Image (cartoon, rainbow, N blue to C red):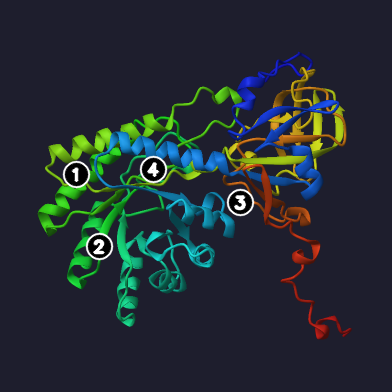
Amino acid sequence: MANPLEMQQIHLESRLALFPRSTKIAAQPGLEALTIAGIPLQELAAQFGTPLYIYDRATMDGAVGEYRQALSEAYPGETGLTYASKSFLCLAIAQWAAEMDLWLDVTGIGEMTIAHAAAVPKPRILVHGVNKSQLDLETAVSLAGVIVVDNLSELNRLIEILPFYSEPSVDIWLRFRPGLAVHTHAYTQTGQIDSKFGMGLEDMEQAVRLCMEKGLPLKGIHFHQGSHFHDPSPLKPALDSTLDLISRLRNRFDWTPQALCPGGGWGVPYHEDDLPHLPVRDYIRTICNQLLAGCSSRCLPLPRLQIEPGRSLVAQAGTAIYRVDTVKHTPGRRWLLLNGGMADNPRPALYRARYSALPAANPQRPSIGPAWLAGPYCESGDILIEDLAMPEVEPGELVAIPVSGAYQLSMGSNYNGAPRPAVVWLSNGNAALIQRRETFEDLIRRDLPLPARWNEKK
């Protein structure tokens, strides 16, 4: 950790690179303003309040374009992209995914309900989940196009359900556990041998046998090794293991998948120290080259390649705006205490995630040294950013934290009775509220009073 008393330089160009693609520093009367989609962040905060989350459509569209370009260059077969609802989902985001012809990966009846309300076409709703309830499965058969079966118990329950539907139009994929994980935080690894996700070799064979016997529409295989990784090389042995499995299934059951999904989870830079970051095209090229060579050497037909980009579609598009309420100095630290924190972004507390930040006004001011940006909640772990070079910041100023589009609001809470922030959509110089700020009335809407008879004196 740097000496808190030492000056640290703000590498403005690198820090700005973390923000949405439309971010600029624009001259305003008496100051320079940080703008996104042409709108000063101070204007957005004045209109919608803080804490505030904003999503830049141009950045999201651009990320989709990068993936599609990379796939078209590297893979001659059919391809597709799936948006991970768990990264952040609301009605407007689901509508955007449908407009962009993305598939939507949903888990549980709640996310299925949002997808259905957004009129996402049934064939593009793909249902994940390690422990789908009976209601989840019944809803998935009605609303979804693909169910990714995680285990044999789930498959048997699905077999019991399907006869009650006269014309079920849902396809079945099986989730394989390759026994290999990518290098990432232990909490976001999913492909290791003892992972709770997916099936091993013997269960996969039994699952295919059951599908063949029951005449089920088995169409694909899915695997996933982890989230927020930066080196694609561990995908190679996992793809080889999966192709070995497919060869074995072809020989035993005369079946090969029409679709293969090697998951997603490609990481993004959250801090200027994470730059430069390996481009998406290198990640996609690794997958495609390995798959093309593996299918050729095993005489397998090329499957449809379905990629789940995860946070790399949406993380950079999101920015969180907070107000600095208090500036506090302790013997070794300068604290910028914000009006939001762990309740809307638990990632630093969960994963030690690193973020960066800039003031919304005059962001080119020089640093006076490191600062710790923390929230108002009654937890010592409520620290969003540690040891970050920052200029002098006064109470009442706004700070913006980039790369806030994924796994923040979706993992947030009402800790200490905090209302959930408002969410704003930015496109072509326009700002629209897509999720209103939670009210204090919302906080008690589900509550019921203690029964009167329990309050009676005995």
Question: Could you tell me residue 9's position as x and y percent?
Answer: 70, 15
Question: Could you tell me residue 131's position as x and y percent?
Answer: 43, 63
Task: Indicate the amino acid at tag 3.
Answer: Met
Task: Indicate the amino acid at tag 1.
Answer: Asp
Q: Is the residue under label 3 in contact with that under label 1 (CB below 8 Å)?
A: no
**Chain-order first, disc 2 or disc 4:** 2
Q: Single out the mark in the foreground, 3 or 2.
A: 2
Q: Single out the mark in the foreground, 1 or 2.
A: 2
55 above or below 183? below
Q: Which residue is mark 2?
A: 218
Q: Which residue is mark 4?
A: 225
Please indicate, yes or no, whether residue 211 appears anywhere in the rendered image.
Answer: yes
**Chain-order first, disc 3 or disc 2:** 2
Q: CA distance from mark 1 to mark 3?
A: 37 Å
Q: Nearer the viewer, residue 299 or 243?
A: 299
**Chain-order first, disc 4 or disc 3:** 4
Question: Could you tell me residue 266's position as x and y percent?
Answer: 44, 37
Q: Say which element carries label 3.
A: helix
**Chain-order first, disc 4 or disc 1:** 4
Q: Which residue is mark 1?
A: 244
Quadrant of image for the C terminus: bottom right
Q: Residue at x 31, y 34 (%)?
A: 73
Left or right, 360 with respect to 65, comes to right
Per the rendering, the mark at residue 411 is: 3
Task: Indicate the amino acid at tag 2.
Answer: Leu
